[in-house]
Image (tube, rainbow, N blue to C red):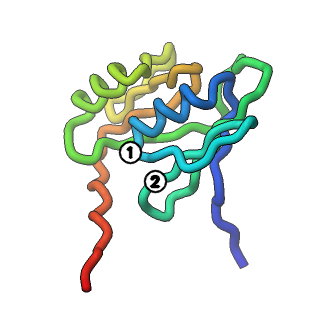
């Protein structure tokens, strides 16, 4: 017997803002929202990401983080795109193969140099 990740939950002050940021980073879409937060989903079977409003602010380094990989361009081009979306460089230094960034609420994530090909479009044949 095994388990699978159903959702990734991120505590935050502004669920709408973070959902918008991560939708634009990952190509996800908002699929649900209520008074507690916002849920986003990708086109594949990857886990949904839930942004839940909490009263306290982030105060220390994340214990878990995303590694994001460009799909169709270089790490440098993706870095420029992510910064334009609202990411900022973290005070933590990466290596030659990754850059440490923060989302608009200061959650660290890494931009990797390796590329992952984009998901193929769904087949809608007859």
Residue 46, relative to residue 26: is it above or below?
below
Task: Locate the C terminus by quadrant.
Answer: bottom left
- Residue 106 x, y percent position in the rendering: 57, 20
Quarter holding residue 1: bottom right
Residue at 30%, 42% in the rendered image: 70
Left or right of 96 in this view: 20? right
- List the residue tagged with mark 1: 27
The numbered mark, 2 or 1, whose residue comes first in the sequence reads: 1
Residue that extends furthest to the bottom in the rendered view of this protein: 126
Residue 121, relative to residue 52: is it above or below?
below
> Which secondary structure lies at badge 1?
loop
Asked if the residue at tag 1 contacts the one at tag 2, i.e. Cβ–Cβ closer than 8 Å, the answer is yes
- Residue 115 x, y percent position in the rendering: 28, 47
Q: Residues within 10 Å of mark 1 (few under 14, many from 20)?
A: few
- List the residue tagged with mark 2: 42
Residue that extends furthest to the right in the rendered view of this protein: 55
- Residue 111 x, y percent position in the rendering: 39, 34
Q: Nearer the viewer, residue 31 or 28?
A: 31
Residue at 55%, 29% in the rendered image: 18
Q: In 3D space, how far apart are the residues under numbered discs 2 and 1 (Cα atoms)?
A: 7 Å
Q: Residues within 10 Å of mark 2 (few under 14, many from 20)?
A: some
């Amino acid at each position: 017997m095994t388990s699978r990740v159903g959702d990734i939950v991120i505590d935050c002050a502004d669920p709408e803002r973070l959902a918008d940021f991560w939708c634009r980073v990952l190509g996800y879409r908002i699929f649900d929202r209520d008074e507690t937060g916002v849920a986003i989903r990708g086109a594949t079977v990857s886990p949904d990401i839930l942004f839940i409003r909490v009263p306290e602010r982030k105060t220390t380094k994340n214990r878990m983080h995303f590694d994001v990989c460009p799909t169709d361009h270089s790490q440098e081009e993706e870095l420029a795109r992510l910064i334009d979306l609202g990411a900022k460089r973290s005070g933590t230094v990466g290596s030659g193969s990754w850059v440490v960034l923060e989302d608009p609420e200061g959650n660290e994530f890494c931009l990797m140099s390796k590329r992952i090909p984009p998901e193929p479009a769904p087949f809608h044949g007859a």
